[in-house]
Amino acid sequence: MSFHIALNFEDGVTRFIDANAGETVADAAYRQGVNIPLDCRDGACGTCKCFAEAGRYDMGDNFIEDALTEEEAEQGYVLTCQMRAESDCVVRVPASSDVCKTQQASYEAAISNVRQLSASTIALSIKGESLSKLAFLPGQYVNLQVPGSSETRAYSFSSLPKDGEVSFLIRNVPGGLMSSFLTNLAKAGDAMTLAGPLGSFYLRDIKRPLLLLAGGTGLAPFTAMLEKIAAQGSEHPLHLIYGVTNDFDLVEMDKLADFAARIPNFTWSACVANPESAYPQKGYVTQHIEPKHLNDGNVDVYLCGPPPMVEAVSQYIREQGIQPANFYYEKFAASAA
Ligand SMILES: Cc1cc2nc3c(=O)[nH]c(=O)nc-3n(C[C@H](O)[C@H](O)[C@H](O)COP(=O)(O)OP(=O)(O)OC[C@H]3O[C@@H](n4cnc5c(N)ncnc54)[C@H](O)[C@@H]3O)c2cc1C
Ligand code: FES
């Protein structure tokens, strides 16, 4: 039996390795060419200390307090030279991928579907043999090379990989390099290169209620997360608020309704900022956050969208005087800047 271990490096790169039952995570990493910082390999020096974000594992008792204190172990810190996985795990490594002699992987694939969902939004799917080896944590992104140029743009996966196919939800920025390619030129069969996966905005173990806040195509990482949640279930309530500027920016509403039907604890609402909107719920995401969604701070907040929206919502939450247990965010910053 073996387990998938996601190693997240300081520079945002993620590498997946397999660890056999009984094998230490450090041994598994070295066997697969990832040199996690190590020294004693004996649980004595603390050089291999990392943070386990998710998963079950056994640390044994062959390590000393100087290397890892009881308090650190309770918080989730691990010594990878002692850690033996008992399920798939996510481990944050306090070093860059370079230092660990690894790097993001690159994949060659082809467009399988590209369609305009509305005047402002494009759905893109890419498929290829090589993508059957691509693993990522729901919420993460890749860099997609713009065909015919050496430039890349970052896009969050909007679904989990299926049969070598991955999908994206892309804002059509007028005059933008990738936007223009996708709107005017792209067709099924066109080659595309992806590099990743990347990013620390991904779904953690669900230990308390979640509040998910999406702005525009910032919905993408959440549809990937919801696919995972639909498959594994959640004991805790999850609420998504999806805000856009104009009515035509509202997309994937059927998909959200479908998730609500499949995930018993999941509720959602959408709102449109434009006061001329015909949509019943108007205003910004912050106007639709209710005290119960913040649950006196016993909540994990995930926030994704354009930088001004992420800043406005972060400030709003601070002003409520509530400190969420965890607050994760992703800004869809313009890559061309
Ligand atoms: C981690 C990360 C994940 C991302 N994931 C997604 C995603 O899932 N979906 C998605 O749609 N986008 C996402 N983005 C943004 C995306 O990478 C591109 O920046 C965006 O799609 C524009 O690319 P473009 O080539 O069409 O335009 P560009 O050629 O990059 O830009 C053209 C002009 O438009 C401006 N511009 C670019 N983006 C915007 C914007 N959003 N609003 C206003 N002006 C803009 C630029 O400054 C430039 O002047 C993500 C960004 C990051 C950093
Ligand atoms: S390498 Fe020294 S404690 Fe793990």
Image: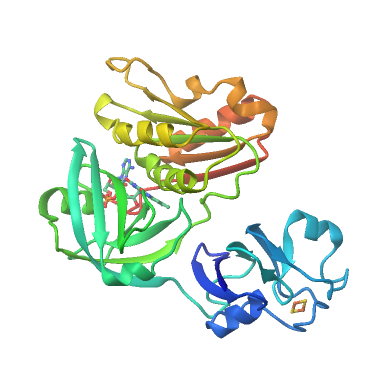
Residue situated in front as seen by the camera: 17 or 99 = 17
**For residue 151, what is the image quadrant?**
bottom left
**In the rendered view, does 210 fall on the left or right side of 147?**
right
Residue 233 visible? The answer is yes
Question: Quadrant location of the N terminus?
Answer: bottom right
> What residue occupies the far front of the structure in this picture?
1
- Where residue 262 appears, as percent x and y from the top left, is 43, 36
Establish if 177 lies above or below 325: below
Residue 127 or residue 143, whichever sits in front: 127
Residue 82 coordinates in the image, percent (x, y): 74, 75
Q: Residue at x 63, y 35 (%)?
A: 299
Q: Quadrant of residue 274?
A: top left
Using the rendered view, name the quadrant where residue 37 is placed. bottom right
Count of labels in the image: 0
The answer to whether one can see residue 172 in this image is no
Q: Position of residue 156 (x, y in %)?
A: 38, 52
Q: Height in image: 45 above or below 234?
A: below
Specify how the rendered protein is coloured. Answer: rainbow
| Residue 280 screen position, x and y as percent | 34, 14
Seen at 50% across and 39% down, the residue is: 303
Looking at the image, residue 206 sits to the left or right of residue 192; the answer is right
